[in-house]
Image (cartoon, rainbow, N blue to C red):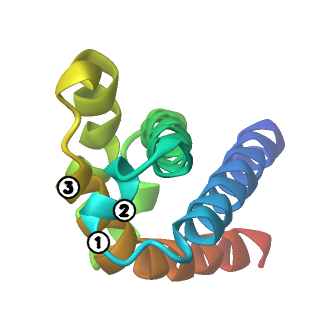
Protein backbone atom coordinates (compact mmCIF):
# COMPACT_ATOMS: atom_id res chain seq x y z
CA UNK A 1 0.00 0.00 0.00
CA UNK A 2 2.70 2.49 1.01
CA UNK A 3 6.35 2.23 0.13
CA UNK A 4 8.92 2.02 2.93
CA UNK A 5 9.72 5.74 2.88
CA UNK A 6 6.04 6.74 3.00
CA UNK A 7 5.37 4.32 5.84
CA UNK A 8 8.30 5.69 7.88
CA UNK A 9 7.12 9.26 7.28
CA UNK A 10 3.51 8.41 8.16
CA UNK A 11 4.49 6.60 11.36
CA UNK A 12 6.86 9.39 12.40
CA UNK A 13 4.14 11.99 11.90
CA UNK A 14 1.61 9.87 13.78
CA UNK A 15 4.02 9.49 16.70
CA UNK A 16 4.49 13.29 16.78
CA UNK A 17 0.71 13.74 16.77
CA UNK A 18 0.32 11.18 19.56
CA UNK A 19 2.89 13.06 21.63
CA UNK A 20 1.05 16.35 21.07
CA UNK A 21 -2.31 14.86 22.04
CA UNK A 22 -0.83 13.41 25.22
CA UNK A 23 0.68 16.81 26.09
CA UNK A 24 -2.66 18.49 25.54
CA UNK A 25 -4.38 16.01 27.84
CA UNK A 26 -1.69 16.52 30.48
CA UNK A 27 -1.88 20.31 30.27
CA UNK A 28 -5.68 20.28 30.23
CA UNK A 29 -5.76 18.33 33.48
CA UNK A 30 -7.14 20.64 36.15
CA UNK A 31 -8.99 22.91 33.72
CA UNK A 32 -12.67 22.77 34.73
CA UNK A 33 -14.11 25.51 32.51
CA UNK A 34 -13.05 27.80 29.69
CA UNK A 35 -12.72 30.57 32.29
CA UNK A 36 -9.80 28.67 33.85
CA UNK A 37 -7.80 29.49 30.72
CA UNK A 38 -8.37 33.21 31.27
CA UNK A 39 -8.13 33.39 35.05
CA UNK A 40 -4.36 33.98 35.35
CA UNK A 41 -1.00 33.69 33.59
CA UNK A 42 -0.87 29.92 34.17
CA UNK A 43 -4.22 29.49 32.47
CA UNK A 44 -3.20 31.67 29.54
CA UNK A 45 0.03 29.72 29.22
CA UNK A 46 -1.96 26.48 29.05
CA UNK A 47 -4.31 27.98 26.46
CA UNK A 48 -1.36 29.10 24.35
CA UNK A 49 0.50 25.80 24.59
CA UNK A 50 -2.60 23.71 23.90
CA UNK A 51 -3.47 25.91 20.93
CA UNK A 52 0.00 25.48 19.46
CA UNK A 53 -0.25 21.71 19.84
CA UNK A 54 -3.65 21.77 18.10
CA UNK A 55 -1.99 23.64 15.23
CA UNK A 56 0.72 20.96 15.09
CA UNK A 57 -1.89 18.17 15.13
CA UNK A 58 -3.89 19.79 12.33
CA UNK A 59 -0.75 20.27 10.25
CA UNK A 60 0.34 16.70 10.95
CA UNK A 61 -2.94 15.23 9.76
CA UNK A 62 -2.86 17.48 6.69
CA UNK A 63 0.56 16.01 5.89
CA UNK A 64 -0.71 12.47 6.49
CA UNK A 65 -3.59 13.13 4.12
CA UNK A 66 -1.19 14.42 1.49
CA UNK A 67 1.30 11.53 1.84
CA UNK A 68 -1.48 8.93 1.73
CA UNK A 69 -3.18 10.63 -1.22
CA UNK A 70 -6.25 11.31 0.93
CA UNK A 71 -6.86 7.59 1.57
CA UNK A 72 -5.57 6.67 5.04
CA UNK A 73 -7.88 8.84 7.12
CA UNK A 74 -10.94 7.64 5.18
CA UNK A 75 -10.53 4.31 6.96
CA UNK A 76 -11.27 6.03 10.29
CA UNK A 77 -14.61 7.82 9.77
CA UNK A 78 -15.29 8.25 13.50
CA UNK A 79 -13.18 11.44 13.45
CA UNK A 80 -14.30 14.66 11.72
CA UNK A 81 -10.98 14.98 9.84
CA UNK A 82 -11.92 18.18 8.05
CA UNK A 83 -12.40 19.93 11.40
CA UNK A 84 -9.24 18.39 12.90
CA UNK A 85 -7.19 19.70 9.99
CA UNK A 86 -9.13 22.97 9.85
CA UNK A 87 -8.48 23.97 13.47
CA UNK A 88 -4.89 24.63 12.42
CA UNK A 89 -6.03 27.33 10.00
CA UNK A 90 -8.47 28.89 12.44
CA UNK A 91 -5.91 29.16 15.24
CA UNK A 92 -3.07 30.27 12.97
CA UNK A 93 -4.98 32.92 11.06
CA UNK A 94 -7.31 34.20 13.78
CA UNK A 95 -5.17 33.81 16.88
CA UNK A 96 -6.16 37.13 18.42
CA UNK A 97 -9.78 36.05 18.20
CA UNK A 98 -9.15 32.65 19.76
CA UNK A 99 -12.15 31.44 21.70
CA UNK A 100 -11.21 29.70 24.94
CA UNK A 101 -14.62 27.99 24.98
CA UNK A 102 -13.89 26.25 21.67
CA UNK A 103 -10.48 25.09 22.88
CA UNK A 104 -12.07 23.87 26.12
CA UNK A 105 -14.75 21.92 24.21
CA UNK A 106 -12.15 20.33 21.93
CA UNK A 107 -10.01 19.27 24.88
CA UNK A 108 -12.91 17.99 26.94
CA UNK A 109 -14.87 16.22 24.21
CA UNK A 110 -12.57 15.31 21.33
CA UNK A 111 -9.01 14.59 22.43
CA UNK A 112 -9.57 11.16 24.02
CA UNK A 113 -11.22 9.84 20.86
CA UNK A 114 -8.54 11.42 18.68
CA UNK A 115 -5.84 9.76 20.78
CA UNK A 116 -7.56 6.36 20.58
CA UNK A 117 -7.93 6.67 16.82
CA UNK A 118 -4.34 7.82 16.39
CA UNK A 119 -3.16 4.80 18.38
CA UNK A 120 -5.32 2.55 16.18
CA UNK A 121 -3.84 4.03 13.01
CA UNK A 122 -0.31 3.52 14.37
CA UNK A 123 -1.12 -0.08 15.31
CA UNK A 124 -2.72 -0.79 11.94
CA UNK A 125 0.24 0.73 10.07
CA UNK A 126 2.70 -1.45 12.00
CA UNK A 127 0.93 -4.66 11.01
Q: Residue 23 lies in what quarter of the image?
A: bottom right
Q: Does dot 2 land on a helix, a strand or a loop?
A: helix
Image point (29%, 72%), residue name: 33
Q: Is there a contact, CB below 8 Å, between mark 1 and mark 3? A: no
Q: Nearer the viewer, mark 3 or mark 2?
A: 2
Residue 55 is left or right of residue 14, and the answer is left
Q: Is residue 74 visible?
A: yes
Q: Nearer the viewer, mark 1 or mark 3?
A: 1
Vertical placement of 11 versus 59: above or below? below
Rate crowding at label 2 as few (under 14), some (14 to 19) or many (20 or more) other CA atoms within 10 Å: some
Where does label 1 land, which residue? 33
What number is the disc on residue 36? 2
Image point (74%, 40%), residue name: 9
Q: Is there a contact, CB below 8 Å, between mark 2 and mark 1? A: yes
Q: Quadrant of the N terminus?
A: bottom right
Image point (45%, 42%), residue name: 44
Vertical placement of 119 versus 24: above or below? below
Question: Residue 30 or 65: which is nearer the viewer?
Answer: 30
Q: Residue 14 lies in what quarter of the image?
A: bottom right
- Percent position of residue 26, x then y: 65, 70
Rate crowding at label 1 as few (under 14), some (14 to 19) or many (20 or more) other CA atoms within 10 Å: few
Rate crowding at label 3 as few (under 14), some (14 to 19) or many (20 or more) other CA atoms within 10 Å: few
Vertical placement of 66 versus 125: above or below? above
Marks 1/3: CA–CA distance = 11 Å
Image point (20%, 55%), residue name: 102
- Percent position of residue 7, x then y: 74, 49
Where does label 3 land, which residue? 102
Vertical placement of 29 versus 80: above or below? below
Marks 2/1: CA–CA distance = 6 Å
Amino acid sequence: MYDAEQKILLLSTLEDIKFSIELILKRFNGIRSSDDFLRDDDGLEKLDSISMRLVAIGEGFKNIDKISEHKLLLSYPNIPWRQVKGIRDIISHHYFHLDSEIIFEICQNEMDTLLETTLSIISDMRR
